[in-house]
Image (cartoon, rainbow, N blue to C red):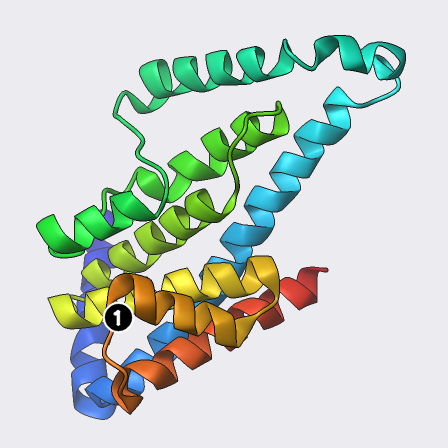
Amino acid sequence: MQTHKRTLLTRFLVWRLKHISHKQFIYIISIVVGVLSGVAAIAIKNFTRFIQHLLEGNLIEKYHTAFYFIFPIIGLTLVYFIIKYIFRKPITQGIPSTLFAISKKKGFIERYKMIASLITAPITVGFGGSVGLEGPTVATSAALSSNLSRMFHLNQATRTLLIGCAAAGAMSSLFKAPVAAIIFAVEVFSLDLTLVSLIPLLIASVSAIITSYFFF
């Protein structure tokens, strides 16, 4: 099965080189990255709200205030055991980990980070942890775009651009501000202000916000 998948991917890559230019392919991939970023933002927000709804349900509604100091401890404990016994690798969430991957690892991000933040961040925030969802959403989206670029054998410059597209898509989906998300990605990831970078960023940002509106 895995050999068959590799054969199909190889055929697609050969077909792409013959029929689609590099610029056109970046535009297409930026749409995919934007949609994936929007889905990641939706998944993280909905999972967090689901946990919050469970904890504030009718079962403990009258006693909820008594658990304000207990819930964060329970959430952090659950995350600790998930990291130790399921992933068994350190999970560095947020924008600094993405910047580290770009500067030290040529934009390559481990595959497990595509789902790590999707699980640990909602549990932490849903149980009352004093963190936000922006960093984990960017980290998840960046991991998705990095592994997507790895699958299609894209170079480091394109991989960095797609990570910026993922960050723009994540912020656009969360805050419904596509232009501000583009500025954020350009500033944080030090992307060049050229049409080569701005058009994919715009496409990813708009794709992400459309995806978010589609589900909400």
Q: Is residue 39 above or below residue 83?
A: below
| Residue 155 located left or right of residue 195 | left
Q: Is residue 215 visible?
A: yes
The residue identified by callout 1 is 161
Q: Is residue 173 above or below residue 1?
A: below
Q: Is residue 155 visible?
A: no
Q: Is residue 47 above or below residue 140?
A: above
| Residue 120 located left or right of residue 144 | right
| Residue 185 located left or right of residue 52 | left
Where residue 148 sits in the image (x, y, percent)?
29, 60
- Residue at the image position 59 percent from the left and 52 percent from the top: 42
- Residue at the image position 47 percent from the left and 68 percent from the top: 181
| Residue 104 located left or right of residue 20 | left
Where residue 20 sits in the image (x, y, percent)?
25, 89
- The total of numbered circles placed on residues is 1
- Binning the other alpha carbons within 10 Å of mark 1 as few (below 14), some (14 to 19) or many (20 upward) gives many
Q: Splitting the image into 4 quarters, where does residue 96 fall?
A: top left
Where residue 144 sits in the image (x, y, percent)?
35, 54
Near-viewer residue (112 or 125) = 125
Amino acid type indicated by mark 1 = Leu
Near-viewer residue (198 or 152) = 198
- Residue at the image position 25 percent from the left and 25 percent from the top: 89
Q: Which structural element holds mark 1?
A: helix
- Residue at the image position 72 percent from the left and 60 percent from the top: 216
Where residue 182 sits in the image (x, y, percent)?
42, 73
